[in-house]
Amino acid sequence: MASTSRLAGIGTLRHAFVPSPVQGRTSAELRAYIEGTNPISKNAFAEDLLDGLTRPLDDRDIAGMAFEQSKSRLLDPDTEENLLAAFAENGWTDQLPVVLPTEERVEAMLAGTSHPPDKVVGKLRAASTRDYWEFTVEQAAVNAVMAGARPEYFPVILALLGSGYSARHSSISSMAPMVVVNGPIREQIKMNSGIGAMGPYGHSNVTIGRAYGLGSQNLQGGSVPGISYMGTLGNPFSFTNLTFAENEEYSPWEPYHLRYGFAAEDSTATVFMGVRTMVTAGGLGENWRENALRVFGAMRGGGGAIIVLDPLAAQTLVEHHGFTHRQDLIEWVADNARVRAGLWWGQGLQDLFFGRRGREGVEPWASYLKAGPDDLIPINVPEDIHVIVMGGRTTASWRVFEGWGNGTPQERMLSGRSVSIDEWR
């Protein structure tokens, strides 16, 4: 709580603590917390609660906290070793070595776009309680250089940073983004959409994703564990943000970005926020539907799902299982992947995200609220299910990624947001 209040700019927020965790505890156990002792102060919890609410504010309470937003353009000259150490000590890296952003290297990166260096790209923030920070094309170029990217990748990096979605969001659930690139730029910058595309086997994939992460943390005012980053476990996806291109050439379906009104000849990047877990599924034999429902049954209800299929898996679903269109698969998952209502609502933050809408009569959440605890309800609505084709056609493999939220009002969980790359050329 102390770190959360600092993140919100409230340095002396009064706290009354109960033991943690509270999830999974019985009503009797939770009541005992309230009627018991604050484990920090050793006072009665109710006493600390009333004191915090009624004691007059003092000067420290009123002062709050301020966050410095000024940025120095240049560092004093020094040895490469000392400069690299300074970058690490100041939290400007992802704890891996970086390419030092000299003026010459930044100028070369800027040649990758027609936009002037002082143009404002967008704004980012670590959490909904923090102020937004604006940043320019040149500042984005600094982070692109640090990540080892090449100038021809820069329009993709600008599109991602300008999306408004931070790759270093401070959610306690340790979420990371997934980035999917569509359109002609995939071939132009040799993005990997085949064998090993989610791994370290594509220079553009890896460095674009890394630049998105470095830019997010540096251009939003930092990403410091316990201060501006609260992800309890952390997320290994954050190093490259699962950045890859869709394998359009071998997909039996239309390119993914057409779902958002773009044309096939448009180059886009889609950002999926809130990715937390990955399940590698089984084969695509006669019992595929039964196996698939077990996979989706392990997902968090309402969290959204990204289904990533090797082209061989996608082709098998078309030829042997009748999913002629991508939407056919989405609808089947939405209609058939179900969970008990008691489990769906018993996931901690479900009531916060969906309960209000259900009580206001918004469907399908209103029906979910009316369901009995053992009634089966859909895990996800179609709008929260996404299907991407990617892989090297060595086996009919597929995976499901699950997530939660996107840092904006929760109209859609794990919502895909496709942004134009072409406008940043």
Image (spheres, rainbow, N blue to C red):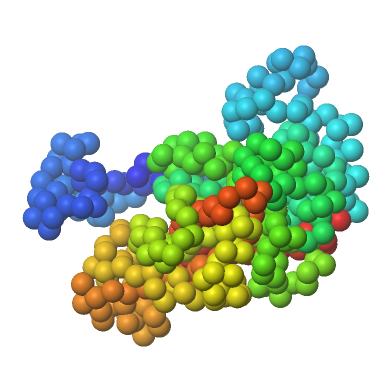
Tell me what residue is drawn at x 41 percent, y 39 percent. 233
- Nearest the viewer among 225 and 194 is 194
Relative vertical location of residue 259 with respect to residue 362 in this rendering, above or below:
above
Where's residue 11, x and y in %?
43, 42
x and y percentages locating residue 235 in the rendered image: 49, 41
Instruction: Tell which of 408 and 42 is nearer to you.
Output: 408
Total number of numbered labels?
A: 0
347 lies above or below 135: below
Q: Position of residue 116 (x, y in %)?
A: 88, 51
Q: Position of residue 56 (x, y in %)?
A: 30, 51
Position of the N terminus by quadrant? top left
Query: In this orientation, does residue 354 appear?
Result: no
Judge left or right: residue 169 versus residue 42: right
> Who's the residue at 85% across and 46% down the image?
152
User: Is residue 56 found left or right of 423 in the rendered image?
Assistant: left
Q: From the viewer's perspective, tell me whether residue 385 is left or right of residue 373.
A: right
Q: Quadrant of the C terminus?
A: bottom right
Which quadrant of the figure has residue 296?
A: bottom left
Q: Residue at x 46, y 61 (%)?
A: 285
Which residue occupies 47% across, 50% down?
280
Can you name the residue that lies furthest to the bottom here? Answer: 361
Residue 92 appears in the figure: yes
